[in-house]
Image (tube, helix red, strand yellow):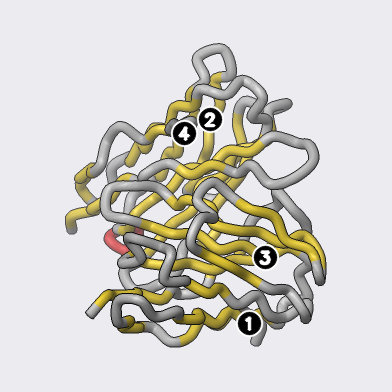
Amino acid sequence: DQQVKQNSPSLSVQEGRISILNCDYTNSMFDYFLWYKKYPAEGPTFLISISSIKDKNEDGRFTVFLNKSAKHLSLHIVPSQPGDSAVYFCAASAEGIGNDMRFGAGTRLTVKP
Amino acid sequence: DGGITQSPKYLFRKEGQNVTLSCEQNLNHDAMYWYRQDPGQGLRLIYYSQIVNDFQKGDIAEGYSVSREKKESFPLTVTSAQKNPTAFYLCASSQRINQPQHFGDGTRLSIL
């Protein structure tokens, strides 16, 4: 049962343009969302997060948008750089007892020079 | 310099053998996790621990076992009961449960 879905396995953009990575979730109890970035042969690294009380969080070139009614979040990278080429995972969790963080399958972003 | 260390990076196992994957963190984090990643799938939780001497099953705990005798260490044993153990295994930790996690670089397990 995939509660977090990243429907695009890959995305290719030109350097300097915007990259938009999408993520959908099904569990309405999720109230905290995260994006991780993963380079080959390394573990994922935390990139940015957003709680359900916000609809936008920005950190430098990275902005995450949350649309609770659509159960959808997106990560915008502006401007995209070749070093951003990696696999991006979205994750979601609900406040409460225990751990229920769920990860999407990932989207491989390629930024072409 | 703080982080999570997983060893070994590559591991081979004969059928019917148990094998233990190591995970050590020096971040002073309370919570630790083990995930399995298969091609085309997200990270699936095997076990997690919120505190020393306590751990809980995740979604795919069958065929695996863990221990948390020290805050810094959370080893995962893949037992012979795990029928499809070939995968990439990731260990992670966080200050507390459901906070952003720091990941190790993973161990790739293969069956000979």
Residue A96 percent coordinates (x, y): 79, 37
Q: Give the number of the disc on residue B32.
A: 3
Q: Are marks 3 and 4 on the same chain?
A: no
* Between A107 and B58, the one nearer to me in the picture: B58
Residue B78 percent coordinates (x, y): 47, 71
Dot 4 falls on a residue whose secondary structure is strand
Q: Give the number of the disc on residue A65.
A: 2
- Quarter of the image for residue B96 reads bottom right
Q: In this view, does B107 lie above or below B36?
A: below
Say what amino acid the circle numbered 3 marks: Met
Residue A28 percent coordinates (x, y): 61, 20
Q: Looking at the figure, which quarter contains the C terminus of chain A? A: bottom left
Say what amino acid the circle numbered 4 marks: Val
Q: How far apart are marks 2 and 1 (CA)?
A: 34 Å
Q: Label 1, on which residue?
A: B24
Q: Verify CB contact (< 8 Å) between mark 2 and mark 1.
A: no
- Quarter of the image for residue A27 reads top right
Q: In this view, does A24 lie above or below B49?
A: above
Q: How far apart are marks 3 and 4 (CA)?
A: 21 Å
Say what amino acid the circle numbered 1 marks: Glu
Q: Residue at x 49, y 53 (%)?
A: A36
Q: Verify CB contact (< 8 Å) between mark 1 and mark 3.
A: no
> Label 4: chain?
A
Q: Give the number of the disc on residue A4.
A: 4
